[in-house]
Protein backbone atom coordinates (compact mmCIF):
# COMPACT_ATOMS: atom_id res chain seq x y z
CA UNK A 1 0.00 0.00 0.00
CA UNK A 2 1.58 3.24 -1.20
CA UNK A 3 1.19 6.80 0.05
CA UNK A 4 2.66 10.11 -1.14
CA UNK A 5 3.76 12.17 1.82
CA UNK A 6 5.87 15.13 0.73
CA UNK A 7 5.71 14.17 -2.93
CA UNK A 8 7.51 10.83 -2.55
CA UNK A 9 6.20 7.26 -2.48
CA UNK A 10 6.28 5.24 0.74
CA UNK A 11 5.10 1.64 0.73
CA UNK A 12 3.72 -0.48 3.59
CA UNK A 13 3.11 -4.21 3.47
CA UNK A 14 -0.37 -5.52 4.14
CA UNK A 15 -0.92 -7.17 7.52
CA UNK A 16 -2.49 -10.59 6.94
CA UNK A 17 -2.63 -11.75 10.53
CA UNK A 18 -4.40 -15.04 11.28
CA UNK A 19 -7.14 -14.59 8.65
CA UNK A 20 -5.17 -15.79 5.66
CA UNK A 21 -1.84 -16.84 4.24
CA UNK A 22 0.76 -15.08 2.15
CA UNK A 23 -0.24 -15.39 -1.50
CA UNK A 24 0.55 -13.84 -4.88
CA UNK A 25 -1.79 -10.96 -5.65
CA UNK A 26 -2.94 -10.87 -9.30
CA UNK A 27 -5.15 -7.75 -9.31
CA UNK A 28 -6.46 -5.04 -6.97
CA UNK A 29 -9.11 -2.29 -6.88
CA UNK A 30 -10.34 0.28 -4.38
CA UNK A 31 -13.86 -0.05 -3.01
CA UNK A 32 -16.55 2.32 -1.79
CA UNK A 33 -14.18 4.26 0.50
CA UNK A 34 -10.48 5.11 0.33
CA UNK A 35 -9.85 2.82 3.29
CA UNK A 36 -11.31 -0.25 1.58
CA UNK A 37 -9.30 -2.23 -0.99
CA UNK A 38 -9.88 -5.60 -2.66
CA UNK A 39 -7.32 -7.91 -4.25
CA UNK A 40 -7.49 -11.18 -6.19
CA UNK A 41 -5.06 -13.98 -5.40
CA UNK A 42 -3.45 -16.79 -7.39
CA UNK A 43 -5.49 -19.36 -5.45
CA UNK A 44 -8.89 -17.90 -6.39
CA UNK A 45 -9.62 -15.85 -3.25
CA UNK A 46 -10.64 -12.21 -2.99
CA UNK A 47 -8.96 -10.43 -0.06
CA UNK A 48 -10.80 -7.54 1.58
CA UNK A 49 -8.56 -4.89 3.18
CA UNK A 50 -9.24 -1.97 5.50
CA UNK A 51 -6.28 0.38 5.45
CA UNK A 52 -3.38 -2.15 5.42
CA UNK A 53 -5.14 -4.87 7.43
CA UNK A 54 -6.78 -7.97 5.96
CA UNK A 55 -10.28 -8.31 7.40
CA UNK A 56 -11.78 -11.09 5.25
CA UNK A 57 -11.18 -13.56 2.39
CA UNK A 58 -13.83 -14.89 -0.01
CA UNK A 59 -13.50 -17.83 -2.42
CA UNK A 60 -14.32 -16.38 -5.85
CA UNK A 61 -12.86 -18.61 -8.60
CA UNK A 62 -11.27 -21.97 -9.30
CA UNK A 63 -7.76 -20.79 -10.02
CA UNK A 64 -6.22 -17.31 -10.11
CA UNK A 65 -8.37 -14.17 -10.06
CA UNK A 66 -6.78 -12.22 -12.92
CA UNK A 67 -9.13 -9.25 -13.15
CA UNK A 68 -11.51 -7.22 -11.02
CA UNK A 69 -13.61 -4.11 -11.62
CA UNK A 70 -15.37 -1.99 -8.99
CA UNK A 71 -18.94 -0.80 -9.63
CA UNK A 72 -21.14 1.66 -7.76
CA UNK A 73 -23.04 -1.14 -6.04
CA UNK A 74 -20.80 -4.15 -6.41
CA UNK A 75 -17.91 -5.81 -8.21
CA UNK A 76 -17.27 -7.95 -11.26
CA UNK A 77 -14.41 -10.48 -11.32
CA UNK A 78 -12.84 -12.76 -13.91
CA UNK A 79 -10.56 -15.75 -13.41
CA UNK A 80 -8.55 -18.45 -15.06
CA UNK A 81 -11.61 -20.71 -14.89
CA UNK A 82 -13.26 -18.67 -17.67
CA UNK A 83 -16.09 -17.44 -15.44
CA UNK A 84 -17.30 -13.86 -14.98
CA UNK A 85 -18.87 -13.25 -11.56
CA UNK A 86 -21.05 -10.36 -10.35
CA UNK A 87 -20.87 -9.57 -6.61
CA UNK A 88 -22.62 -7.28 -4.15
CA UNK A 89 -20.73 -4.34 -2.62
CA UNK A 90 -19.39 -6.38 0.32
CA UNK A 91 -18.53 -9.65 -1.46
CA UNK A 92 -21.07 -11.35 0.79
CA UNK A 93 -23.09 -12.75 -2.10
CA UNK A 94 -22.39 -13.73 -5.70
CA UNK A 95 -25.28 -12.30 -7.71
CA UNK A 96 -24.67 -14.04 -11.04
CA UNK A 97 -22.03 -15.93 -13.00
CA UNK A 98 -21.41 -16.12 -16.73
CA UNK A 99 -19.37 -18.98 -18.22
CA UNK A 100 -17.58 -18.05 -21.45
CA UNK A 101 -18.57 -20.91 -23.75
CA UNK A 102 -19.24 -21.40 -27.46
CA UNK A 103 -22.83 -22.38 -26.66
CA UNK A 104 -23.43 -19.02 -24.95
CA UNK A 105 -22.54 -16.93 -28.02
CA UNK A 106 -25.41 -14.80 -29.30
CA UNK A 107 -26.93 -15.92 -32.64
CA UNK A 108 -25.66 -12.81 -34.44
CA UNK A 109 -22.14 -13.03 -33.04
CA UNK A 110 -19.42 -13.25 -35.69
CA UNK A 111 -16.32 -15.36 -35.30
CA UNK A 112 -15.36 -18.45 -33.32
CA UNK A 113 -14.14 -19.00 -29.77
CA UNK A 114 -10.81 -20.82 -29.75
CA UNK A 115 -11.91 -22.84 -26.71
CA UNK A 116 -14.53 -22.95 -23.95
CA UNK A 117 -13.76 -21.27 -20.63
CA UNK A 118 -10.71 -19.26 -21.76
CA UNK A 119 -8.70 -17.58 -19.03
CA UNK A 120 -10.05 -14.05 -18.42
CA UNK A 121 -7.29 -11.43 -18.24
CA UNK A 122 -9.18 -8.11 -18.34
CA UNK A 123 -12.66 -6.98 -17.40
CA UNK A 124 -14.71 -3.79 -17.39
CA UNK A 125 -18.36 -2.77 -17.22
CA UNK A 126 -20.48 -0.01 -18.70
CA UNK A 127 -23.93 0.68 -20.22
CA UNK A 128 -25.31 -2.59 -18.93
CA UNK A 129 -22.65 -4.76 -20.58
CA UNK A 130 -19.50 -6.45 -19.33
CA UNK A 131 -16.41 -6.28 -21.55
CA UNK A 132 -14.11 -9.28 -21.19
CA UNK A 133 -10.60 -9.83 -22.57
CA UNK A 134 -9.26 -13.40 -22.74
CA UNK A 135 -5.79 -14.89 -23.00
CA UNK A 136 -6.70 -16.13 -26.48
CA UNK A 137 -6.83 -12.59 -27.88
CA UNK A 138 -10.62 -12.26 -27.78
CA UNK A 139 -12.70 -9.30 -26.60
CA UNK A 140 -16.26 -10.27 -25.66
CA UNK A 141 -19.34 -8.30 -24.68
CA UNK A 142 -21.46 -10.05 -22.06
CA UNK A 143 -25.03 -8.88 -21.72
CA UNK A 144 -26.38 -9.02 -18.16
CA UNK A 145 -29.23 -11.19 -19.43
CA UNK A 146 -26.77 -13.84 -20.62
CA UNK A 147 -25.92 -13.66 -24.37
CA UNK A 148 -22.25 -13.18 -25.28
CA UNK A 149 -21.10 -11.30 -28.39
CA UNK A 150 -17.61 -11.76 -29.83
CA UNK A 151 -16.38 -8.28 -30.79
CA UNK A 152 -12.71 -8.71 -31.74
CA UNK A 153 -10.27 -11.59 -31.89
CA UNK A 154 -6.76 -12.24 -33.12
CA UNK A 155 -3.54 -14.07 -32.47
CA UNK A 156 -2.41 -14.15 -28.86
CA UNK A 157 1.27 -14.94 -28.38
CA UNK A 158 4.67 -14.34 -29.97
CA UNK A 159 4.68 -12.75 -33.42
CA UNK A 160 2.61 -13.12 -36.60
CA UNK A 161 4.60 -13.64 -39.82
CA UNK A 162 2.62 -16.13 -41.87
CA UNK A 163 0.11 -14.56 -44.28
CA UNK A 164 -1.50 -15.85 -47.48
CA UNK A 165 -4.44 -14.57 -49.52
CA UNK A 166 -6.76 -16.95 -51.39
CA UNK A 167 -6.29 -17.02 -55.20
CA UNK A 168 -10.02 -16.70 -55.97
CA UNK A 169 -11.93 -15.68 -52.80
CA UNK A 170 -11.86 -12.71 -50.37
CA UNK A 171 -10.31 -14.72 -47.54
CA UNK A 172 -6.82 -15.02 -46.09
CA UNK A 173 -4.88 -17.35 -43.80
CA UNK A 174 -2.51 -16.45 -40.97
CA UNK A 175 -0.21 -18.54 -38.81
CA UNK A 176 1.83 -17.38 -35.83
CA UNK A 177 3.98 -18.36 -32.88
CA UNK A 178 0.80 -18.99 -30.84
CA UNK A 179 0.45 -22.42 -32.55
CA UNK A 180 -2.76 -21.56 -34.39
CA UNK A 181 -3.70 -21.47 -38.07
CA UNK A 182 -6.61 -19.13 -38.78
CA UNK A 183 -8.80 -18.38 -41.79
CA UNK A 184 -10.26 -14.84 -42.01
CA UNK A 185 -13.13 -13.39 -44.01
CA UNK A 186 -12.04 -10.19 -45.79
CA UNK A 187 -15.59 -9.19 -46.73
CA UNK A 188 -17.37 -6.60 -44.52
CA UNK A 189 -18.03 -9.18 -41.79
CA UNK A 190 -14.26 -9.32 -41.04
CA UNK A 191 -14.63 -12.42 -38.88
CA UNK A 192 -12.60 -15.57 -38.29
CA UNK A 193 -14.04 -18.41 -40.35
CA UNK A 194 -11.95 -21.31 -39.06
CA UNK A 195 -9.12 -22.04 -36.65
CA UNK A 196 -6.89 -24.99 -35.97
CA UNK A 197 -4.36 -25.62 -33.22
CA UNK A 198 -0.91 -26.77 -34.37
CA UNK A 199 1.80 -28.79 -32.63
CA UNK A 200 4.26 -25.90 -33.09
CA UNK A 201 4.16 -22.24 -34.00
CA UNK A 202 4.50 -21.26 -37.66
CA UNK A 203 6.02 -18.45 -39.70
CA UNK A 204 4.68 -18.96 -43.25
CA UNK A 205 1.73 -20.32 -45.23
CA UNK A 206 0.56 -20.44 -48.84
CA UNK A 207 -2.59 -21.44 -50.75
CA UNK A 208 -2.33 -23.78 -53.73
CA UNK A 209 -3.17 -22.19 -57.13
CA UNK A 210 -6.67 -23.73 -57.07
CA UNK A 211 -7.24 -22.65 -53.45
CA UNK A 212 -8.09 -26.17 -52.28
CA UNK A 213 -4.92 -26.81 -50.26
CA UNK A 214 -2.98 -24.74 -47.75
CA UNK A 215 0.69 -25.33 -46.93
CA UNK A 216 1.99 -24.28 -43.50
CA UNK A 217 5.64 -24.08 -42.41
CA UNK A 218 6.34 -24.66 -38.71
CA UNK A 219 9.09 -23.51 -36.37
CA UNK A 220 10.51 -27.00 -35.76
CA UNK A 221 11.52 -27.51 -39.40
CA UNK A 222 8.41 -29.47 -40.41
CA UNK A 223 5.59 -28.43 -42.70
CA UNK A 224 2.13 -29.72 -43.50
CA UNK A 225 -0.45 -29.39 -46.25
CA UNK A 226 -4.05 -29.16 -45.08
CA UNK A 227 -7.45 -29.05 -46.75
CA UNK A 228 -8.24 -25.34 -47.10
CA UNK A 229 -11.92 -25.91 -46.24
CA UNK A 230 -11.65 -28.26 -43.25
CA UNK A 231 -8.01 -27.60 -42.16
CA UNK A 232 -7.52 -31.36 -41.87
CA UNK A 233 -4.11 -32.85 -42.66
CA UNK A 234 -3.42 -34.02 -46.19
CA UNK A 235 0.32 -34.68 -45.82
CA UNK A 236 3.24 -33.61 -43.61
CA UNK A 237 7.04 -33.73 -43.89
CA UNK A 238 10.13 -32.94 -41.83
CA UNK A 239 13.58 -32.83 -43.42
CA UNK A 240 14.89 -29.77 -41.54
CA UNK A 241 15.41 -28.82 -37.91
CA UNK A 242 15.32 -25.03 -38.23
CA UNK A 243 12.37 -22.66 -38.76
CA UNK A 244 10.56 -22.92 -42.10
CA UNK A 245 10.73 -19.28 -43.22
CA UNK A 246 8.88 -19.37 -46.57
CA UNK A 247 6.74 -21.82 -48.53
CA UNK A 248 5.43 -21.55 -52.11
CA UNK A 249 3.39 -23.65 -54.55
CA UNK A 250 4.48 -23.55 -58.19
CA UNK A 251 2.00 -21.81 -60.54
CA UNK A 252 -0.47 -23.59 -62.78
CA UNK A 253 -1.36 -27.00 -61.40
CA UNK A 254 0.72 -26.47 -58.25
CA UNK A 255 2.76 -29.58 -58.99
CA UNK A 256 5.77 -28.51 -56.92
CA UNK A 257 6.13 -27.00 -53.46
CA UNK A 258 9.24 -24.99 -52.53
CA UNK A 259 10.01 -25.00 -48.80
CA UNK A 260 12.68 -22.60 -47.49
CA UNK A 261 14.25 -22.89 -44.05
CA UNK A 262 16.52 -20.83 -41.82
CA UNK A 263 19.32 -23.38 -42.29
CA UNK A 264 19.98 -21.84 -45.75
CA UNK A 265 18.32 -24.52 -47.91
CA UNK A 266 15.27 -24.65 -50.16
CA UNK A 267 13.68 -28.09 -50.59
CA UNK A 268 11.47 -28.77 -53.62
CA UNK A 269 8.72 -31.40 -53.28
CA UNK A 270 6.54 -33.07 -55.87
CA UNK A 271 3.06 -32.62 -54.42
CA UNK A 272 1.58 -35.43 -56.51
CA UNK A 273 4.09 -38.09 -55.43
CA UNK A 274 4.74 -36.57 -51.96
CA UNK A 275 8.50 -36.84 -52.47
CA UNK A 276 11.40 -34.42 -52.21
CA UNK A 277 12.85 -34.06 -55.71
CA UNK A 278 15.37 -31.24 -55.33
CA UNK A 279 17.50 -29.22 -52.90
CA UNK A 280 18.63 -25.64 -53.60
CA UNK A 281 22.09 -25.08 -52.11
CA UNK A 282 24.45 -22.11 -52.13
CA UNK A 283 22.77 -19.52 -49.91
CA UNK A 284 25.10 -18.08 -47.27
CA UNK A 285 22.29 -17.02 -44.93
CA UNK A 286 18.68 -17.85 -44.05
CA UNK A 287 15.98 -17.57 -46.74
CA UNK A 288 13.66 -14.55 -46.46
CA UNK A 289 11.60 -14.43 -49.69
CA UNK A 290 10.86 -16.74 -52.59
CA UNK A 291 9.03 -16.52 -55.95
CA UNK A 292 8.33 -18.82 -58.92
CA UNK A 293 8.40 -17.77 -62.55
CA UNK A 294 5.17 -18.22 -64.52
CA UNK A 295 6.43 -21.48 -66.11
CA UNK A 296 7.18 -23.06 -62.73
CA UNK A 297 10.75 -23.82 -63.80
CA UNK A 298 12.73 -21.08 -62.04
CA UNK A 299 12.88 -20.04 -58.40
CA UNK A 300 13.99 -16.60 -57.16
CA UNK A 301 15.34 -16.52 -53.60
CA UNK A 302 16.32 -13.68 -51.22
CA UNK A 303 18.54 -14.30 -48.20
CA UNK A 304 19.37 -12.50 -44.98
CA UNK A 305 22.80 -11.68 -46.44
CA UNK A 306 21.09 -9.57 -49.15
CA UNK A 307 21.66 -12.18 -51.83
CA UNK A 308 19.36 -12.56 -54.82
CA UNK A 309 19.76 -16.14 -56.05
CA UNK A 310 18.14 -18.21 -58.80
CA UNK A 311 17.59 -21.97 -58.96
CA UNK A 312 16.33 -24.25 -61.70
CA UNK A 313 13.30 -26.30 -60.66
CA UNK A 314 12.68 -29.00 -59.74
CA UNK A 315 16.29 -30.21 -59.31
CA UNK A 316 17.51 -27.07 -57.58
CA UNK A 317 20.56 -26.31 -59.72
CA UNK A 318 21.90 -22.80 -59.10
CA UNK A 319 21.61 -20.39 -62.04
CA UNK A 320 23.43 -17.13 -62.82
CA UNK A 321 21.11 -14.59 -64.47
CA UNK A 322 22.10 -10.98 -65.32
CA UNK A 323 19.89 -8.28 -63.83
CA UNK A 324 18.70 -7.16 -67.27
CA UNK A 325 17.50 -10.68 -68.01
CA UNK A 326 15.70 -10.89 -64.64
CA UNK A 327 13.49 -7.98 -65.70
CA UNK A 328 12.42 -9.86 -68.84
CA UNK A 329 11.30 -12.96 -66.93
CA UNK A 330 7.60 -13.30 -66.22
CA UNK A 331 7.07 -13.98 -62.52
CA UNK A 332 4.00 -15.67 -61.06
CA UNK A 333 4.41 -13.42 -58.00
CA UNK A 334 6.86 -10.82 -56.78
CA UNK A 335 7.64 -10.67 -53.07
CA UNK A 336 11.36 -10.05 -53.49
CA UNK A 337 12.94 -7.03 -51.80
CA UNK A 338 16.17 -7.23 -53.82
CA UNK A 339 17.12 -6.52 -57.41
CA UNK A 340 17.22 -3.53 -59.74
CA UNK A 341 13.42 -3.54 -60.12
CA UNK A 342 12.91 -2.69 -56.45
CA UNK A 343 16.11 -0.86 -55.54
CA UNK A 344 14.12 2.25 -54.69
CA UNK A 345 12.19 0.65 -51.82
CA UNK A 346 15.20 0.79 -49.48
CA UNK A 347 15.43 3.79 -47.12
CA UNK A 348 18.41 6.14 -47.07
CA UNK A 349 19.74 4.75 -43.81
CA UNK A 350 18.87 1.15 -43.11
CA UNK A 351 19.99 -2.37 -42.31
CA UNK A 352 19.78 -5.40 -44.57
CA UNK A 353 16.54 -6.59 -42.96
CA UNK A 354 14.76 -3.22 -42.61
CA UNK A 355 12.34 -3.96 -45.48
CA UNK A 356 10.64 -7.11 -44.28
CA UNK A 357 8.11 -7.80 -47.04
CA UNK A 358 6.84 -6.73 -50.44
CA UNK A 359 4.04 -7.71 -52.80
CA UNK A 360 3.27 -6.65 -56.37
CA UNK A 361 -0.21 -6.12 -57.77
CA UNK A 362 -1.38 -8.46 -60.52
CA UNK A 363 -1.06 -5.68 -63.12
CA UNK A 364 2.58 -5.12 -62.04
CA UNK A 365 2.04 -1.40 -61.41
CA UNK A 366 2.15 -0.95 -57.63
CA UNK A 367 4.56 -2.54 -55.16
CA UNK A 368 3.51 -2.60 -51.49
CA UNK A 369 6.16 -2.97 -48.78
CA UNK A 370 6.31 -3.38 -45.01
CA UNK A 371 9.30 -2.49 -42.87
CA UNK A 372 10.80 -2.63 -39.40
CA UNK A 373 9.59 0.91 -38.64
CA UNK A 374 5.91 -0.04 -38.79
CA UNK A 375 5.31 1.64 -42.17
CA UNK A 376 3.28 0.32 -45.07
CA UNK A 377 4.48 1.94 -48.30
CA UNK A 378 3.31 2.00 -51.92
CA UNK A 379 5.81 2.41 -54.77
CA UNK A 380 5.37 2.60 -58.51
CA UNK A 381 6.81 -0.53 -60.10
CA UNK A 382 9.50 -0.91 -61.23
CA UNK A 383 11.13 1.11 -58.43
CA UNK A 384 14.49 1.62 -60.13
CA UNK A 385 17.16 3.89 -58.73
CA UNK A 386 17.82 4.70 -55.12
CA UNK A 387 15.28 6.25 -52.74
CA UNK A 388 12.16 5.98 -54.86
CA UNK A 389 9.07 8.11 -54.23
CA UNK A 390 6.34 6.47 -52.21
CA UNK A 391 3.13 6.77 -50.25
CA UNK A 392 3.50 5.90 -46.59
CA UNK A 393 0.80 4.73 -44.15
CA UNK A 394 0.89 3.93 -40.45
CA UNK A 395 -1.33 1.52 -38.50
CA UNK A 396 0.91 -1.11 -36.90
CA UNK A 397 2.55 -0.38 -33.55
CA UNK A 398 5.53 -2.63 -34.32
CA UNK A 399 7.37 -3.90 -37.39
CA UNK A 400 5.27 -5.00 -40.36
CA UNK A 401 6.15 -8.63 -41.02
CA UNK A 402 4.16 -9.42 -44.17
CA UNK A 403 2.01 -7.79 -46.87
CA UNK A 404 -0.23 -9.42 -49.50
CA UNK A 405 -2.69 -8.15 -52.13
CA UNK A 406 -6.01 -9.96 -52.49
CA UNK A 407 -6.77 -11.85 -55.71
CA UNK A 408 -8.40 -8.78 -57.34
CA UNK A 409 -6.00 -6.16 -55.85
CA UNK A 410 -8.94 -4.42 -54.14
CA UNK A 411 -7.48 -4.92 -50.66
CA UNK A 412 -4.02 -4.97 -49.16
CA UNK A 413 -3.61 -7.24 -46.14
CA UNK A 414 -0.77 -6.61 -43.67
CA UNK A 415 0.29 -8.29 -40.43
CA UNK A 416 2.32 -6.87 -37.56
CA UNK A 417 4.86 -8.83 -35.59
CA UNK A 418 4.60 -8.16 -31.88
CA UNK A 419 1.24 -6.37 -32.16
CA UNK A 420 -0.20 -9.65 -33.59
CA UNK A 421 -2.66 -7.61 -35.65
CA UNK A 422 -4.15 -8.14 -39.10
CA UNK A 423 -4.88 -4.91 -40.99
CA UNK A 424 -7.00 -4.43 -44.12
CA UNK A 425 -6.40 -1.52 -46.50
CA UNK A 426 -8.72 -0.50 -49.33
CA UNK A 427 -6.84 0.21 -52.54
CA UNK A 428 -8.38 2.83 -54.82
CA UNK A 429 -6.91 2.94 -58.31
CA UNK A 430 -5.81 6.25 -59.77
CA UNK A 431 -8.63 8.03 -61.54
CA UNK A 432 -11.28 6.29 -59.41
CA UNK A 433 -10.65 7.94 -56.06
CA UNK A 434 -13.29 9.89 -54.18
CA UNK A 435 -12.73 13.13 -52.32
CA UNK A 436 -12.54 11.72 -48.81
CA UNK A 437 -9.52 12.29 -46.60
CA UNK A 438 -6.77 9.70 -46.93
CA UNK A 439 -4.17 8.75 -44.36
CA UNK A 440 -0.98 8.99 -46.40
CA UNK A 441 1.71 10.82 -44.44
CA UNK A 442 3.63 11.79 -47.55
CA UNK A 443 1.25 14.22 -49.27
CA UNK A 444 -1.84 16.26 -48.51
CA UNK A 445 -3.72 14.96 -51.54
CA UNK A 446 -3.78 11.65 -53.33
CA UNK A 447 -4.68 13.25 -56.66
CA UNK A 448 -2.46 12.92 -59.66
CA UNK A 449 -2.40 16.73 -59.99
CA UNK A 450 -0.57 16.92 -56.68
CA UNK A 451 2.31 14.96 -58.08
CA UNK A 452 0.98 11.50 -57.32
CA UNK A 453 3.52 9.51 -55.35
CA UNK A 454 5.47 11.82 -53.07
CA UNK A 455 8.30 11.38 -50.59
CA UNK A 456 9.68 13.18 -47.59
CA UNK A 457 12.78 14.14 -49.59
CA UNK A 458 10.76 16.00 -52.24
CA UNK A 459 8.57 17.67 -49.65
CA UNK A 460 11.59 18.85 -47.67
CA UNK A 461 13.23 20.35 -50.76
CA UNK A 462 10.12 22.34 -51.62
CA UNK A 463 9.85 24.05 -48.23
CA UNK A 464 11.04 27.68 -48.31
CA UNK A 465 12.75 28.48 -45.03
CA UNK A 466 12.72 32.28 -44.49
CA UNK A 467 15.48 33.51 -42.21
CA UNK A 468 13.86 35.77 -39.64
CA UNK A 469 16.77 36.31 -37.27
CA UNK A 470 17.58 40.09 -37.13
CA UNK A 471 14.55 40.88 -39.31
CA UNK A 472 13.00 42.81 -36.42
CA UNK A 473 14.65 44.99 -33.78
CA UNK A 474 15.18 43.45 -30.40
CA UNK A 475 14.49 46.79 -28.64
CA UNK A 476 12.97 50.07 -29.89
CA UNK A 477 15.44 52.42 -31.58
CA UNK A 478 15.20 56.20 -31.99
CA UNK A 479 17.40 59.02 -33.28
CA UNK A 480 19.59 59.18 -36.37
CA UNK A 481 21.74 56.27 -37.38
CA UNK A 482 25.47 56.97 -36.82
CA UNK A 483 26.47 56.85 -40.49
CA UNK A 484 23.77 59.43 -41.34
CA UNK A 485 24.63 61.93 -38.63
CA UNK A 486 26.24 65.24 -39.69
CA UNK A 487 29.63 65.72 -38.09
CA UNK A 488 31.14 69.12 -37.22
CA UNK A 489 34.43 69.81 -39.07
CA UNK A 490 37.61 69.38 -37.02
CA UNK A 491 40.16 72.22 -36.43
CA UNK A 492 42.43 70.85 -39.15
CA UNK A 493 39.52 70.75 -41.59
CA UNK A 494 38.68 74.35 -40.79
Image (spheres, rainbow, N blue to C red):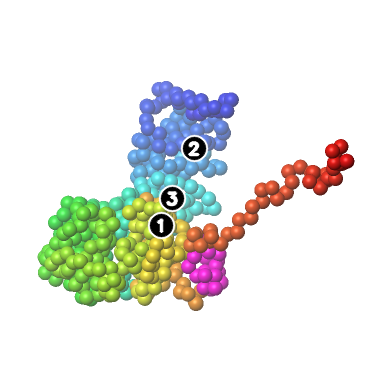
For image coordinates 57% across by 33% down, the residue present is: 33
Per the model, the C-alpha gap separating discs 3 and 2 is 17 Å
Residue 229 coordinates in the image, percent (x, y): 27, 68
In the displayed structure, 457 sits above or below 13; it is below
- Foreground label between 1 and 3: 1
Per the model, the C-alpha gap separating discs 1 and 2 is 48 Å
Q: Is residue 150 visible?
A: no
- Read off the magenta span: 434-454
Callout 3 touching callout 2 (CB < 8 Å): no
Comes first in the chain, label 3 or label 2: 2
Circle 3 sits in a helix, a strand or a loop, which is it?
Answer: strand
Residue placed under numbered mark 2 in the picture: 29
Per the model, the C-alpha gap separating discs 1 and 3 is 41 Å
Residue 427: within the magenta?
Answer: no
Residue placed under numbered mark 1 in the picture: 347
Comes first in the chain, label 1 or label 2: 2
Q: Callout 1: 10 Å neighbours few (<14), some, many (20+)? A: some
Circle 1 sits in a helix, a strand or a loop, which is it?
Answer: loop
Residue 485 coordinates in the image, percent (x, y): 83, 45
For image coordinates 79% across by 46% down, the residue present is: 483
In the displayed structure, 277 sits above or below 125; it is below
Amino acid sequence: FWSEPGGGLIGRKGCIGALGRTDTMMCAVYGWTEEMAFSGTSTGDVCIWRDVFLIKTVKAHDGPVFSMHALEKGFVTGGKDGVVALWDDTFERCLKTYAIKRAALAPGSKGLLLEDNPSIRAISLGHGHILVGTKNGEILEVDKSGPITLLVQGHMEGEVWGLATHPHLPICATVSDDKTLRIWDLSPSHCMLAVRKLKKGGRCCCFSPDGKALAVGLNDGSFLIVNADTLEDLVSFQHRKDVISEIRFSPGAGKYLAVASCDNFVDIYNVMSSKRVGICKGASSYITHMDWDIRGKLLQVNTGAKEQLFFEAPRGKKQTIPSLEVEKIGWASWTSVLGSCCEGIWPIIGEVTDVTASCLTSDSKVLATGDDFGFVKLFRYPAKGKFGKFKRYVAHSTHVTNVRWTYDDSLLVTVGGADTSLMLWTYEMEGHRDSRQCDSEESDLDSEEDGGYDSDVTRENEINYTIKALSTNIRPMFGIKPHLQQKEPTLDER
